[in-house]
Amino acid sequence: MTRTSPSLQILLTAAAAVASLSTTALANTAAQPRMLVIEENTMAYGPMIVDVQKNGIRMETVDHEKTILCAAPSWDACLFNNKRKRIYKRPYAVWSQHGMQTALSMQINDFSERAVRERQILYYGLAACEYAFPRRHVKIADYITTNAIDVDPRVSKFVSSLFDCPLTDKGILMRFRRMAGRTFGFGLKYNEEKSIEICVETKKASYAPLDQKLFVAPTDYKPASDGEIFVDPAASNAAFKDLLNP
């Protein structure tokens, strides 16, 4: 048996310690909870930053004034205005049964058939699926979702309710479009005009360490209606006065 020199033994011990620390660091990094951060444009609420974790979703306007939150344990929908310190709560038992139409909701969609999966794609670096809503063999709307974060089904249900886009499968909504078609003249094909309404569109997606504080509603805000959250009553009154007294 060959005896190891003291200096070599010290080097081997140090190398083993470094390897152990590296392994532990990698394990901790892999185990660290993450959230998905999405920068998106919405037709109803404008540009927003969306934070998604397994047990909740938070959507905030880019000026940080207005926030939409739905998270465990209550899963109540909370809409709050950070500038005016006002909050509106819609209990889970209510929005899960009757929807989440807000003062800024643009349209109630009429999807008589469930969306069908069209294809799997890579969307902003994330594995995703594209779905389409059919009607008489014509696509009237489509959407894209990802399962980059394995969310609780209530996250998907809330987003479905907020944007009136019934998701066929659990997932995180990244794009939602409606198609509208009109035909002019005698129905000639070259007279046909089609338009696409983009209700939700992702601009950027990335991961970040989970910040659980983001998913807790403020407790010191005063109760308000959902209309007061998105529309400043003082500004509205001033606008009406201007109209009445030009």
Image: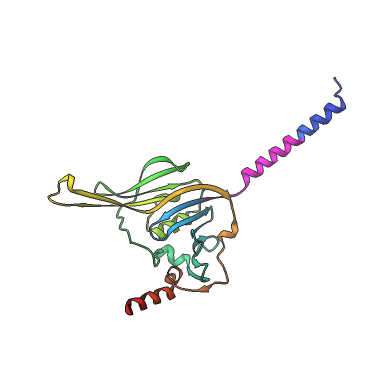
| Quadrant in which residue 2 is drawn | top right
Residue 208: x and y, percent? 57, 49
**Residue under the image location 41 percent in, 40 percent down:** 121
Residue 201: x and y, percent? 41, 51
The image shows residue 8, relative to residue 207, as above or below, that is above
From the viewer's side, name the closer residue of 84 and 175.
84
Residue 10: x and y, percent? 83, 31
| Quadrant in which residue 19 is drawn | top right
**Residue under the image location 70 percent in, 41 percent down:** 24
**Which quadrant of the figure contains the C terminus?**
bottom left
Its colouring scheme is rainbow
From the viewer's side, name the closer residue of 16 and 150.
16
Q: Is residue 51 left or right of residue 230?
A: right
**Which quadrant of the figure contains the N terminus?**
top right
Residue range of the region highlighted in magenta in the rendering = 17-36
**Residue under the image location 57 percent in, 63 percent down:** 216
Residue 61: x and y, percent? 48, 60
Q: Residue pushed farthest front?
A: 246
* Main secondary structure type of the part rendered in magenta: helix
**Residue under the image location 52 percent in, 51 percent down:** 37
Asked whether residue 24 is drawn in magenta, I would say yes
Asked whether residue 80 is drawn in magenta, I would say no
